[in-house]
Amino acid sequence: MVQLTRIYTRGGDQGETSLADGARVPKHDLRVAAYGTVDEANSVIGIARLHTGSSAEGAEADAMLARIQNDLFDLGADLCTPHNPDPKMPPLRIVDAQVERLEREIDRMNAEIPPIRSFVLPGGSAASAHLHLARTVIRRAERLMTELAAAENVNPAAIRYANRLSDHLFVTARWLNDKGRTDVLWVPGANR
């Protein structure tokens, strides 16, 4: 279990930080950028949760988002731990069961939403707008993760999780927009 007795250590004052294996890397390292962006997405989801409301759909969305926030700490731990073929202790890694849970939730919500007839603009309810923002942040994290994977070993389930999560956040945003009825739709060339 994590126990923090001091919040600041001064260890990063020279522009470096420690990975889970103790290696020191620059704070602008691609691995740090990836898990830092996952943390950013987690924070945006926290703001979205303030707006899910007390309806049955809102309570259910809040529960799903709470699980996702916990998963995002797992994802951050996964990304913070470089691959080691012979680790002293098994690292925390995203597993396929977490990806599959997202898929089940997406399918269940999407079954209640009419098909998309236009691109959906970020907006509608406050919760939906924040979830669209979280979706774009997790997409950025996914781009960083795939860039990292081009240079180093990255858990493939972690990349699948990020990819599926952006879909989940999109569907959850639509679901919280009165099951798509209050989505804001793109009208191509509307302002010419």
Image (tube, rainbow, N blue to C red):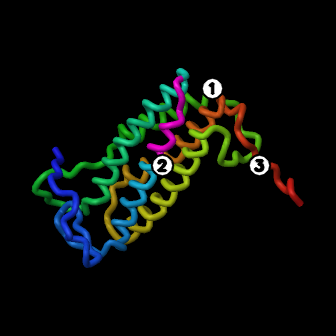
Query: Which is more foreground, mark 2 or mark 1?
Result: 2
Q: What residue is disc 1 on?
A: 112
Mark 2 to mark 1 CA distance (whole Å)? 25 Å
Please tell me in which quadrant of the rendered image residue 82 appears: bottom left
Q: What amino acid is at disc 3?
A: Trp
Q: Is residue 48 magenta?
A: yes
Mark 2 to mark 3 CA distance (whole Å)? 23 Å
Q: What amino acid is at disc 2?
A: Val
Q: What residue is disc 3 on?
A: 186
Of labels 1 and 3, earlier in sequence is: 1
Q: What residue is disc 2 on?
A: 44
Residue at x 73% of width, y 42% of height: 184
User: Relative to residue 15, is residue 184 drawn left or right?
Assistant: right
Q: Is residue 143 magenta?
A: no
Residue 31 pos. (x, y %):
34, 66
Please tell me in which quadrant of the rendered image residue 17 appears: bottom left
Secondary structure, mark 2, is helix
- Mark 3 neighbour density, 10 Å: few (under 14) some (14–19) many (20 or more): few
Residue 178 pos. (x, y %):
66, 29
Secondary structure, mark 1, is loop
Residue at x 21% of width, y 72% of height: 24
Of labels 2 and 3, earlier in sequence is: 2
Which span of residues is magenta-colored?
A: 44-54
